[in-house]
Image: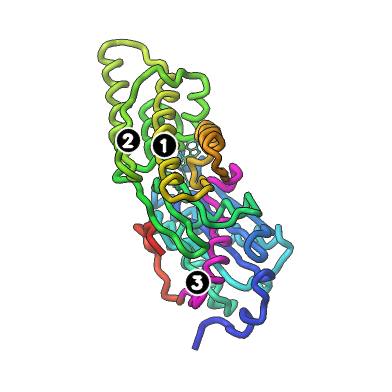
Amino acid sequence: MEYYNKDRIAAKPAEERITLGIESSCDETAAAILRGGRELLADVISTQVPIHRKYGGVVPEIASRNHILNVLPVVDEALKQADMKLSDIDQIAVTYGPGLVGALLVGVAAAKSLAYALEIPLIGVNHLEGHIFANFLSAPDLKPPFVALVASGGHTALVHVADYDSFRLLGQTRDDAAGEAFDKVARVMGLPYPGGPEIDRLAKEGDLHAIDFPKALAKGGYEFSFSGLKSAVLNYLNSQKLKNIPVNNADVAASFQQTVIAILVDKSLSALRETGLDTLVLAGGVAANSALEAELRQATGAAGYKFFFPSRRMCTDNAAMIACRGYYQSLSRDYEYTPLTLNAVPGLSLSDR
Ligand code: KG4
Ligand code: ZN
């Protein structure tokens, strides 16, 4: 016996199916409603950034508690935006990893309860796949195959997206993620959390070539390493301090950011050349970086490749991308909906599929 009404979902044409997406992997509690795969009817994000800012980063326990307070209100708000009732929802997609375990569990528990009560199917979604799928919402004409550069707070990876349900991981970071490096460097420079947007802003006033920071694994295929770069920035700041030399924060931000961008651009172009694909898609919170977007646009354009990146709102964590990923997952051949035993998987990775 299934927990959901099989006849009801089977009777609804795919392009009319209403998917409720729920996201709670880090410090955003979000709900979104999608018709078919690309028509966004509601998109609600409740951010906890101001709460965590005073601690300089996300405090997992505080994040979980706030997700508990926010998860049903964001679903209610999404229903209101879409002018719908819970009974109009056909299926529920929820992030089950990667992320903070306590935070993930709140979204997963809410989604399972709603699926059970409404007798509708559940779709467990990998958050990183969700980031890639955010591009389908920003670019209605985008279709696989393409190379995706995923750069978020927790992950940095290059993925060959052969089809909506066929991925191959080309390479990923061995240590810190690109966003993590932005956040850590910003923190030692005394900038507020999250550091990415702060460095982005400060870098505009600095000299990209002021300081020569190392590019790790420049020849290392599709693997990335950002922890050495982070240490190099810390060492630079400390040595200037010991020598009583004033530091130009804008130059440090610009030089650091340029180093990260050079690595990301270089490896993305190698991936395009070697896979023979003609399209690059940018995904994850770091995709919101204005200089990264400009350089990737320039480099892909000059080499004759197509380039897509999500709208600013779709770059960072949201539930629309989770609903979109869930929808395409449910369309794939032989797809079996997720059982109600679904658990959070904090260390879930992007793997071949
Ligand atoms: O994808 P995301 O919202 O959350 C994760 O899944 O990790 O990414 C958050 C990361 C943070 O590290 C944040 O500093 C970074 O994205 N970020 C940026 C910018 N906006 C957000 N990094 C560089 N430049 C930005 N403008
Ligand atoms: Zn994310």
Eye-nearest disc, 3 or 1? 1
Q: Which residues are magenta?
A: 310-338
Residue occupied by mark 2: 218
Amino acid at pointer 2: Ala
Q: Secondary structure at mark 2?
A: loop
Give the residue drawn at x 49%, y 59%. 68
Label 1 Cα crowd, 10 Å radius (few <14 / some 14-19 / many 20+) = some
**Dot label at residue 112:** 3
**Left or right: where 270 falls relative to 7:** left
Which corner quadrant holds the C terminus? bottom left
**Residue 243: x and y, percent?**
26, 11
**Residue 351: x and y, percent?**
38, 59
Asked if residue 253 is positioned above or below residue 299 in the image, the reply reads: above
Give the residue drawn at x 29%, y 45%. 174
Q: Is residue 303 visible?
A: yes
Of residues 183 and 272, which is closer to you in this image?
272
Q: Secondary structure at mark 1?
A: helix
Q: Are marks 1 and 2 in contact (CB under 8 Å)?
A: yes
Amino acid at pointer 1: Asp
Q: Secondary structure at mark 3?
A: helix
Residue occupied by mark 1: 266
